[in-house]
Structures are given as structure tokens and as C-alpha cells.
Image (cartoon, rainbow, N blue to C red):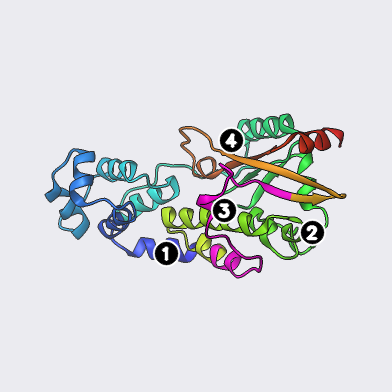
Amino acid sequence: MTAMIDETFQRPVGELLRGWRERRRLSQLDLANQVEVSTRHVSFVETGRSKPSREMVLRLAEHLDVPLRDRNQLLLAAGYAPIYSEASLHSPAMLAIRAALRRLLKAHDPYPALVVDRWWNIVEGNAALKLFTEEVSDELLKPPLNALRLTLHPDGLAPRITNLPEVRTSVLTTLHRQVASTADPDLQDLYEELRGYPGGERTDLAAAAEVVVPMKLRRDGHELSFLTTIATFGTPLDVTVSELMIESFFPADDKTAEYLRGL
């Protein structure tokens, strides 16, 4: 991450904004209409002929759906102080957030649930998460424990996933979209790493009978089937909070629900 931040500071804000606009597949006219300025003004900002005000940087970033972390970098590149805090999840300021997360995770038992950061590193989990960490290589369990690596690594969950090609395809597709959306080099590295794992992929998922891809997992002679949802905090003003994702697993059939309640 340091290399990316240093490179960002060396690049002018107009160049960075143009990159985000192109990533969102918007023309200068599209962006100008959304922000309610002239196309000429957007062009001048991107080429460096006009220095944007602090408010203009934030308006452009809002309409380009730039993550808070990167909005701070845009402000710095434009010569302004960042406005979004980035507190550690274990700091006193985050006490209410941690308490809310732990209540949510505990309430989800006996079904697995976890909280991950922007790079899919697990920062919290409930008791049922042990379903996914048992029989996993000790090396993979060393912090930071990455949820996607845990799922697809041949020494992780992968040997127990009975529909691995479908799960791999779904995970890689989701991660690829995230890379395209954020341009984060660490996420790109993770994507390339996961693509190198064995397990195959499916190219016909769109034609599959399921409306979502379940994860089917072997355990004690049973095949457990899970559906997963992702939740985030609404209107966050802190970088750390904005990047947290709560992944909750639900039984996809009655057999799985009954088995988990029995645990």
C-alpha cells in the first residue's frame, strides 16, 4: 500500500480524477452534467489548467463513487488536508463499532459469520467460524487470515468444497470487479494469486439453475450447503469503517440448518 500512496502523491490530482472517471466509464460531459459544472471546467481540472477547490474535489469524488481512502489521497494530491479519519478497529474511538459487530456476529450463531477489511482479511468472527477453519493448514491460519485465500487455497477449504469450480468462479468474479472498482494493487495481487490455485472454473454460471451460487462443504459425512450475504455500514465517515464487510452464511437447505443447530 505504501508504494501506491507514494505514487499517488507524485501524480497531479487532475490525472488521478481522470483515472477514476475512465474507470467509471464516464465521459467528461457525463461527469460535468452530474456535478453541474461545464465540460470545459472538468477538462481544465483534469489537464491541470485549473486547480480544483477542496469542495470541487469532494464533489467529483462523490459522483465518481471514489472510496474514502482514495478521497483522502485526492485531497492530498490537490494540496489539501484529508478529512476522513482512519482509526484502528481496536482504538477507543471504535468501541461502539466493535460492540455492534460482536453483537451481530454472536446473534448469527449457530451459522458462520465474519467481518473482513478491504483486502478480505478477517478481523472478527463468531464461534461457528470454526466450521471453516478446522482441518486447515496452520500456515494459512497465521494473521492476517484472509477469507478468500482460506476458501480457495488447496491447503484450506478447497478440498472440502464439493462444487469448487462454481465457488472459484464466483469468488474470482467478485474480486475482479472489486479490483476494477478500486484499482488497488494489493487486491490485484490477491486476484492473481487466487487465479493460480487449482480447482477449475465454470464459464456457464449465468445459465445455471441456481439464482445464486451456494458453497457446498463436506463435514463428518454430511454435505452442508451455504448461501452468503455481504453487508456494510451506511454513511461511514471513517476509512476503516467504510471498508468493513460483514459476511453472513445461511443454510441453503433444511438438512444444513438442522445439522448446524445440532452443533
Real-space Cα separation, disc 1 to disc 2, in angstroms: 37 Å
Q: Decide whether residue 83 is among the magenta residues.
A: no
Amino acid type indicated by mark 3? Ser
The residue type indicated by label 2 comes to Val
Q: Amino acid at mark 4?
A: Ala
Numbered disc in front, either 3 or 2: 3
Q: Residues within 10 Å of mark 1 (few under 14, many from 20)?
A: few
Q: CA distance from mark 4 to mark 3?
A: 36 Å
Which amino acid, mark 1? Asp
Give the mark toward the camera: 1 or 3.
3
Local secondary structure at mark 1 = helix
Tell me if residue 144 can be seen. no
Q: Marks 1/4: CA distance?
A: 27 Å
- Residue picked out by circle 3: 170
| Nearer-the-camera pick, 245 or 91 | 245
- Gap between marks 4 and 2 measured at Cα: 34 Å
Circle nearer the viewer, 4 or 3: 3
Q: Which mark is residue 93?
A: 4
Q: Is residue 165 above or below residue 87?
A: below
**Residue appearing at x 66%, y 53% in the figure:** 147
- Tell whether label 2 touches label 3 (CB within 8 Å): no
Give the image quarter of residue 253.
top right
How far across and how far down the image is residue 7, in percent? 39, 65
Determine the CA span between mark 1 and mark 3: 33 Å
Mark 4 or mark 2: which comes first in sequence? Answer: 4
